[in-house]
Amino acid sequence: MKHKVLYTGIAALFAASSAWAVPVLQIGAPAPAGSGEGTYADYQGDTKNPTEKDTAITSGDKLYVGGVYGPNTLFLGGQFLGNGTYPTGPDWSQLTDDPVRPTAFDGHGAILVVSVPDGSLASALSSLQINNQFAFYSDADNSYFVNNHAPLGSSPSTISDFLFFDIGSFGNTGNVSDFVTESGSASGEIKELILSGFGTLAWIHFDVMALETDSQGQTRVKTSADGNPGSHDVTWKDGPPSQEIPEPGTLALLGLGLLGFGASRRYQKKK
């Protein structure tokens, strides 16, 4: 009996650690066919045009968004509507964290934050769709994300325009793994989103945020930047996915190898 209790305790600890290893919110893209990357595209350390760290690059029309329920999560998505034990939670604009969200966010579920190149807002609004739905709101200056996040650095108003799409709330009925390591298992839901209407956009960057209400009835904003070793986000680019730039040390070794090969060839010719 003692052994059974011990094994049960170990299993519970393992399950808890696995759950916590999976980010609350993350965005991924399908791995390119034949790439050997697994289910999800690899997250690249650094990308250019736009500049971003730890993002998956895709030129396809599909995204995956994962939402995870922690041990104390009651609801993940939009406003918690109460269940007889806990009262209705605050809506997006009623939260006092920084930045304060506009009232246009109220009544919506989890929100896909879409960054597009500065000056392209009008065309993106009239063409870009997620699951055949247009953006419900847009802003030329503010992403309403943590630190007003946008690709290309700290001046979003001169870099990006922003669109906001309602992707609904997350269920608590499936298994979600970490899209980066493709390991771990936590309870939640993975949503499949279909992109269309790219128009002439050179790039599109995707982040996600949601309202999480816990068992104490407290509501907070969660994002794909919370508790992640990488950003767990996605950048769409018009064209084949770019490759990672080799580390300087790798380039140096490659250069030495080529020099050695050249010297060997010259020596053989002299013989």
Image (cartoon, grey):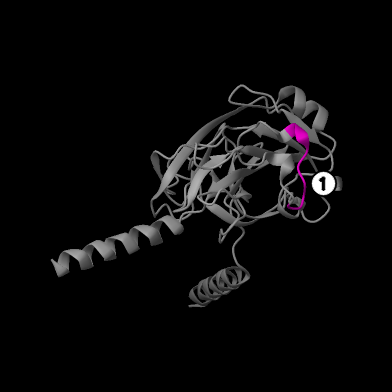
Across and down, in percent, residue 203 comes to 70, 39
Q: Quadrant of the N terminus?
A: bottom left
For badge 1, the amino acid type reads: Ile
Secondary structure, magenta segment, majority class = loop
Q: Closest to the observer: 241 or 99? A: 99
The residue singled out by tag 1 in the image is 159
**Which residue sits at x=76%, y=42%?**
101
Quarter-of-image position of residue 44: bottom right
Residue 76 visible in the displayed image: yes
Q: Is residue 2 above or below residue 117?
A: below
Give the secondary structure at mark 1.
Answer: helix
Q: Residue furthest front?
A: 85
Q: Residues within 10 Å of mark 1 (few under 14, many from 20)?
A: some
Quarter-of-image position of residue 33: top left
**Side of 191 relative to 198 (left or right):** left
Q: Closest to the observer: 250 or 30? A: 30
- Which range is magenta? 97-104
Across and down, in percent, residue 77 comes to 57, 39
99 falls in the magenta region? yes
Across and down, in percent, residue 174 comes to 39, 40
Across and down, in percent, residue 132 comes to 61, 21
**Which residue sits at x=70%, y=34%?**
106
**Which residue sits at x=76%, y=53%?**
98
Quarter-of-image position of residue 252: bottom right
**Which residue sits at x=53%, y=52%?**
216
Q: Closest to the observer: 136 or 250? A: 136
Q: Is residue 111 above or below residue 134?
A: below
Residue 201 visible in the displayed image: no
241 falls in the magenta region? no
Q: Closest to the observer: 268 or 125? A: 125
